[in-house]
Amino acid sequence: MDYELVIVGGGMTGLALAALLADSGLRIAVLENRPSPQSFRAGEPFAARVSALSPASCRLLQQAGAWEGILARRACAYESMVVWDGTGAGEVRFDAAEMGEPALGYIVENRIVQLALLDVLAQKTAVELLFSAPMQGFVIRNGQVCVELEGNRVLGCQLLVGADGADSQARSRAGLDWKQDDPGQKGLVGTVVTTEPHRQTAWQRFMPDGPLAFLPLPDAHACSMVWTLPSDVADACLGRSRASLCDLIAAGLDQRLGAVVSVDALGAFPLQSAYAPSCVAERLALIGDAAHVVHPLAGQGVNLGFRDVAVLADAVRHAPDPGASGVLRRYARSRKGDNLLTLQAMDGFRLLFGNRSPLLTPLRNSGMQWVERLPWLKQRLARQAMGV
């Protein structure tokens, strides 16, 4: 047996799992299709893909030893979040101070989380990192997983962890079902610079075509934008002149941050809502986007994946056989409720705020007004999102 765990996927969730278990006595290999990422350079342009890390996710990364490395590069604490209905008067403001917390969370580029975790793992002898090493397949023989790589190399392990994203090879080769909904939308992403400072506040406006979110970055006038749009509209935006696109984005946010003076790192990616009804199979467990993909409301998807990581790490840390069926059943049971509830909540938001019926506008407005007027309800919603 070469390893106790082989993790397929060297993104945020796969690396976080390896880092949490690096001192557990388990031997771990991480397989990543892509080459090793380039190191961070101070002052480099902001990446388009960011996450809004909840306090619970920040604690997990601290436990993994990566948090100092994240802060040493760059991150932005956000202290408030403003959410409003683009077709009505409903608005809710969440403030960390109201809950006695220093911040609602941190906006961090995904690449920086990955680099900080790689720094941790570079010091761990129990973890082997294999870049440019796509998994070719796997078979189960005599109670162990034989993972096939290029060049006829085979790794033996007790548990294979699929952390390889929505198009997971681990999941598909295990024959696990994948239920998905294609809403015909894309996420238009980019880094925007505005005339007014963001004030360490996340801004999100719900509109019939989809939400527009501005997530604050360390530069007081820079935000990461995620705008959910019909696919054809998102593609058309990519073809606009920068000046007209800046005007469109500023109008989309009701000029809350003044004019948009530039937009960089512009791109669009297809959106989906999907999940695996079972996140385990024989000697296999799925985490992160390999197990579920949620609508990217304000960059929250990775928090669900980190909750998978925390539960799976606890399940296997002291198990005599990490891939035993009892261990995997406990993991699956522990995650099923949270995963389904989060998926349903995200889909519910999309359907409620994406419906053009004028009959729903008063319902949305009154719902937001009730949340704003009832401190206990607002705190409960905020604490649920923050994981505190």
Image (tube, grey):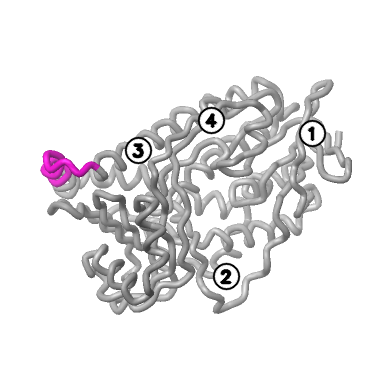
Q: Nearer the observer, disc 4 or disc 3?
A: 4
Q: Nearer the observer, disc 2 or disc 4?
A: 4
Q: Toward the viewer: 32 or 234?
A: 234
Q: Is residue 323 above or below residue 371?
A: above
Residue under numbered circle 3: 347
Q: Secondary structure at mark 2?
A: helix
Q: Amino acid at mark 4?
A: Trp
**What crowding class fits label 3: few (fewer than 14 Cα within 10 Å), some (14-19), or many (20 or more)?**
some
Q: Is residue 43 above or below residue 165?
A: below
**Residue span colored magenta:** 355-366
In the rendered image, residue 116 lying in the magenta stretch gets the answer no
Residue under numbered circle 4: 178
Q: Is residue 253 above or below residue 321?
A: below
Percent position of residue 172, x then y: 64, 32
How far is mark 3 from mark 2, CA to CA?
Answer: 36 Å
Question: Of callouts 2 and 1, which one flags the residue occurring earlier in the amino acid sequence?
Answer: 2
Residue lying at 47% horizontally and 48% vertically, measured from the top left: 56
Give the residue at the far right of this rendering: 152
Residue under numbered circle 2: 72
Question: Of callouts 2 and 4, which one flags the residue occurring earlier in the amino acid sequence?
Answer: 2
Question: Of callouts 3 and 2, which one flags the residue occurring earlier in the amino acid sequence?
Answer: 2
Question: Of callouts 1 and 4, which one flags the residue occurring earlier in the amino acid sequence?
Answer: 1
How far is mark 4 from mark 3, CA to CA?
Answer: 17 Å
Percent position of residue 4, x then y: 77, 35
